[in-house]
Amino acid sequence: MPEPILQVRDLTVHFYTYAGIVKAIENVSFDVYKGETFALVGETGCGKSVTSRALTQLIESPGRIVNGEVIYHSEKGPIDLLKLSEEEIREIRGNEIAYIFQDPHASLDPLYTVGYQIAEAIEVHGKVKNIKEGIKKAVDILRAVLIPDPEKRVHNYPHELSGGMKQRIVIGTGIANNPRILIADEPTTALDVTVQAQILDLINSLKEKYHATVILITHNLGVVAETADRVAVMYAGKIVEIGSVEQIFKNPLHPYTKGLLKAVPNPMTKIERLEAIPGTVPNLITPPGGCRFHPRCPYVMEVCKKKVPELVEIEDGHFVACHLY
Amino acid sequence: MQEEYKKNIFDKIADKLVYGIASFISLFKKDWKAKNKSKMEEWRLMLYALNRSPPALIGVFLVIIFILLGIFGPRLATWRYNYFPSLYTMNFTQVVLAPPGSKAYLEFANTTITYPLGADHFGRDLLSLILSGARTSFVVSIIVISLGVPLGIVLGLIAGYKGGKVDELLMRITDMFLAFPALILAIALSAVLPERIQGFIESHVLLQKFVLWIFALDTREAGNLGRLLSVILAMIIVWWPVYARITRGSTLTEKEKLYIEAARAIGLSSWTIMFKHILPNIIGPILVYITLDFGSVVLMEAGLSFLGLGATPPIADWGRIVYDGAQYFPKAWWLVFYPGLIVMLVALGWNLLGDGLRDVLDPKTRRSIEFKVKKAKGEGEENA
């Protein structure tokens, strides 16, 4: 029986904008097990990033975590991350749960050397006495993220490095404190294809090395197939299907998951043309009633328009929220 | 063949200056020079960019003169501001409102006094008064900027970063201050404050001594400090809201950037993020604004004294000289013309400098200079 490290229950985040309340994510529940790579998949605007940020209360005004709990099984025992004060959650951020953000060009402060920024991440959690010592440690971290000539690079400013190098630095800041959970929010989106594979390999090898758990957020199903152990598919702020990679790719149950997989070229089979899912992601201020996917669903039934489907277990560890099952 | 980059005299001065400062820091911090080579290069390019703009250079020149006058003015003055020649002669007409270039013999003091720029209605030498008055302007502008601006910046940062109710509260207070015309508010405040400040300053002897010292005043003037300080306080009170508003605006855009979120995600505290990551990234435009505002403070201080607030005679103050001299205008035109001219030059100097700084602090201007310098390769390395 795998041991859970993070249990998310009924997580709901709303954004209070002038146009109305944006129900960005609603009743999101999932478990992440120790040592696995858990992928959160979905198209743009479906709430993947909001979910990942809500885990450590990183939601900024006008957003608010309305409901839910995030049970984190720390070494000292389980704690609800959403009930912690700002001070307490800060101890966890970057220390036990670290982030890697999407755009390496924007996630480094242009005014500080990369060494300083890594050192700052270590220093704030009291693992080194001062920045100077932290920079010495940063050299080791740069070596770990496979940056050539780390003694020199540690004194470079972000603008002096390439995109791939910057993403390695960002990963370096993420792993600086040896976190137990590493949340990678579309870590390869801003990079070109040749560098993407290197970065994914790097995340995987670091995960092995530091025994970390990785939550990978992406819309790239190729990346998921390559790296993830389990997958949660999100649509319009809700989780529609959770399962292992094999289950999701071999036996997709939810019509949305099926559509997603059909939209990706498969080198094994010869297809004449790729299929797109008709329609667009609904407006989350007034989401469609019942199942949120029903306006775009090819198998839509009367019940879909009225009743919200619950996640049900179809096979071992494979959950789906659809009235078809 | 492209045109070679030619260094002018100012560029050479810039090289020497940067090299000098770097060597000076190296005295205390070993191998600072080797480590910060790129920083020195950046400074050099900044100064080169400044050298490309003649108005900015004029600004630098005027500002340096103002600063030097501010520091050494009272020492350069031949006569103290409270030396009244009319007390040392029976022949008032030769000293009172003496025209520029005239001389007078003071029979009781047995000295001759010359008036290069003329005399005021007490027979005081106008040149000496202007020199002494430079200190007043200089100290007032420094105090107002160094207290008012940080106050505004801190409040703006907090309002912008925290958002929500804190932002609403702080910005409404700021709006209240901005709703009043600054000059009117300052007039009202400097009319109300003096007595309390006088009482306060008299009960703190050390502070009183310090204030007298920085304004280069005699102990006799202790009774007049209240009015001078009330103007300073009034100006601080009207000065911070603008900065709070600018800082808040830039903070709002800056805090949305991903690296601020990344800083939050590694567990940095709000204060660290505000002062170490947001402030340095938005300080450029604020610096330009500060430079422009030095001129405005000098102008406003002169304006308030011209209205009869602030420095009281015999304390030398540019605005006050104009105020007192206005009664004798146009006969004694020099009492209005020379102090007015110097106030104008100082304000102009700060404005030109601020304009120049705007170009210099823009990395794009700097890069274009860099390309030119690099074309003349080798030459740039000799001093760096």
Image (cartoon, coloured by chain):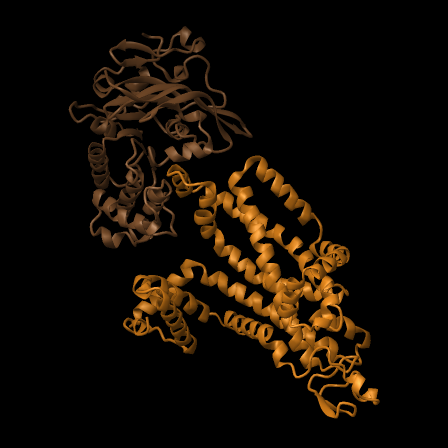
Give the camera-side residue of B77 and A322. Answer: B77
Q: How many marks?
A: 0
Which residue is found at the position 69% from the left and 61% from the top?
B229
| A186 relative to B94 in the view: left or right | left
Give the camera-side residue of A202 and B76. Answer: B76
| B1 relative to B99 in the view: left or right | left
Q: Give the image quarter of residue A38.
A: top left
Residue A278 visible in the shown view: no
Is residue B95 placed above or below B141 in the rendered structure?
Answer: below
Which residue is found at the position 73% from the left and 70% from the top?
B221
Q: Give the image quarter of residue A39.
A: top left
Give the camera-side residue of A138 and A300. Answer: A138
Is residue A77 placed above or below B102 in the rendered structure?
Answer: above
Q: Give the image quarter of residue B259.
A: top left
Q: Residue furthest left?
A: A268
Chain B drawn in what color? orange
Is residue A308 placed above or below A62 in the rendered structure?
Answer: above
Chain A drawn in what color? brown
